[in-house]
Image (cartoon, helix red, strand yellow):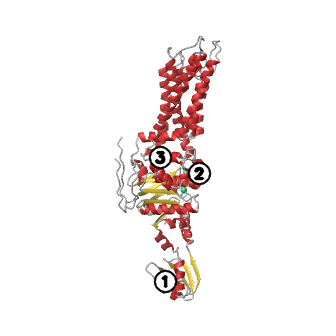
Amino acid sequence: MPSRPGGDGGTAMIEARELTKRYGDKTVVDRLSFTVKPGEVTGFLGPNGAGKSTTMRMVLGLDAPTAGSVTVNGKAYDRHAAPMHEIGALLEAKSVHPGRSAVGHLTALAQTHGISRKRVDEVIDLAGLHSVANKRVGAFSLGMGQRLGIAAALLGDPEVVMLDEPVNGLDPEGVLWIRNLLAQLAAEGRAVLLSSHLMSETAQIADHLVIIGRGRLLADTTVEAFVRETGTGAVRVAADEAARLRELLAGPDVTVSGSTDTELLVTGLGAREIGRVALRHGVALHELTPLGASLEAAFMDLTTDELEYRSAPADGRSAR
Amino acid sequence: MSAIAIERPQEGAASGRTAVKPVRFGRVLLSETTKFRTIRSTWICLSLGLVLLGLFGSIGAFTYDGGGAAVTDGPPGIAGRPLDAVSLALMGLSFASLVVGVFGVLSTAGEYSTGTIRSTLAAVPKRLPVLWAKAILAGAAVFVVAAVGAFAAFLIGSVGLDGEAIALSLKDDGVLRALLGAALYLALVAVFGVALGALLRSPAGGIAALVSILLILPGLAMLLPDSWYDTLNPYFPSNAGGAAYALTETSDRLSPGAGIAVFAGWVALTLAAAAFRLKKTDV
Ligand SMILES: Nc1ncnc2c1ncn2[C@@H]1O[C@H](COP(=O)(O)OP(=O)(O)O)[C@@H](O)[C@H]1O
Ligand SMILES: [Mg+2]
């Protein structure tokens, strides 16, 4: 009978250990170890071709690892009695017959797990597919296809939700919808793994980051730590009374560094708050620039380094 | 079958957890039934198979001119033998076998060409139950349709043959066996298609293999030295299967029972290879 992992916080929901996949002589995933914990959104980041989709296929047992292992709630995926209740996934590639309706597709999936028709209607509504539920999936837009994939992922009311580049093809409203949905799923205590090749987009949704390049782990950290360590997410402020402003901005979560007499680099406060403080105290600003965009640059730096390591002769150390 | 509603305690979750049960073969069978029902090619192939069997068979009987000529063309088991009421009724069998074979191929290979296989195997990670379910359902559906088509062709045809020397009734020797043999043969062809589609993972590849093995292979075999040909010929898949629906037994063929068994053996072999590939390789 199916064993139930407790919903106790802190248990790893997805655990990859030295996970490796080779296609021919090409190593696509290289001794990758990471965990995805419940109650938070883990961003799985890497440039295109880094091995994110391959890793996710291995989580579901669709591709067998060349070496290493990955478990979902403590067991290999195929050892679960009701796998769709453990983890629900949206994969990158299309995985629906274009001639079938959304209802037909979801019903067939639901029946493998004895899931009721009522639940099928529920996820259709949840994904906003009500009006097209009986249309052929082949006629769906990319965005509707993604929504159907997410409906399928949620069908089994899973403890872990794993989505491969879900915002691809979604309009801004769809992106917002996913963001809220994922936050809600994590708040319900579920583990969420979300892949993307865009740092800025992921940093807005994720709590934790697993960053890979060429199949190797580059960073396993929180968004907060990543932002702090890379000095991004900072705001550059220039003011005549920089020293006075520095005191005004001081706070427990705020760090202020300054390179010159008139320029400050502030982290922990947004441009809006800084502007308000300056106005309230009559400090004249002549520059107020959020450096948020350089989060992407920090990510690029990290992953480009990896490319350099790869072209050098193997030195047996893991790139960091 | 034990129905266990898996309940998960979870803080902050909406009230009323979704009841989820373990994956069992019966549930996979139900799911695959839904998949068959919800694509058009199922209905197109099955109704085309029915029409080909029924229509060709009855037309054959109504246009029969009583000359007593041998059938020169037609499916293995019928071609080149004295014309009888059963072989007339099964004039459409060759075409029907292609259609039901394609139906089988599409049910598995179509999952790969559309990507559905990833959803399917994520839901049923043990994998093999999916293949068995498809084989059972395709075989059963085709058996029913083919039996209806063959009997309809024979019964309608017997009106056209009324008074002719070759007229037969269902009660005559071998008639019932031959008609049911035809339905069984077609059901196995559908399973053969299921297996080929799963093995080759491509609709075009599966259909090409099906046509080659059932229709072209027997012809190519004529290039073999005579002694080999005589020994091997009865065992080719479609020749062996043909013995099951021929009204009369001849020395150059297997008996109906042996014939269908040999054909079933080929199908089982292909299905085993498909199962091996399904279980062992990435999708
Ligand atoms: N089935 C396969 N056979 C051979 N190479 C593959 C296969 N799947 C993926 N790859 C290669 O593995 C690398 C990683 O691909 P993928 O996991 O899709 O990366 P990502 O999702 O991070 O963009 C790519 O170079 C891709 O070409
Ligand atoms: Mg990808």
In the image, is residue B141 above or below residue B246? below
Residue A40, visible in the rendered structure: yes
Q: Position of residue A33 (x, y in %)?
A: 44, 59
Which comes sooner in the sequence, label 3 or label 2?
3
In the rendered structure, which amino acid carries the disc numbered 3? Leu
Ligand 1 positioned in quadrant: bottom right
Q: Position of residue B41 (x, y in %)?
A: 57, 38
Circle 3 or circle 1, nearest the eye: 3
Question: What is the spatial separation of the Cα atoms under label 3 and label 2, in whole angstroms?
Answer: 19 Å
Residue A212, visible in the rendered structure: no
In the rendered structure, which amino acid carries the disc numbered 1? Leu
Mark linked to residue A140: 2
Dot 3: chain letter: A
Dot 1: chain letter: A
Q: In the rendered image, which residue does mark 1 sit on?
A: A249
> Are the residues tagged 2 and 1 within 8 Å (C-beta)?
no
Mark linked to residue A109: 3
In the image, is residue A131 above or below residue B148? below
Which comes sooner in the sequence, label 2 or label 1?
2
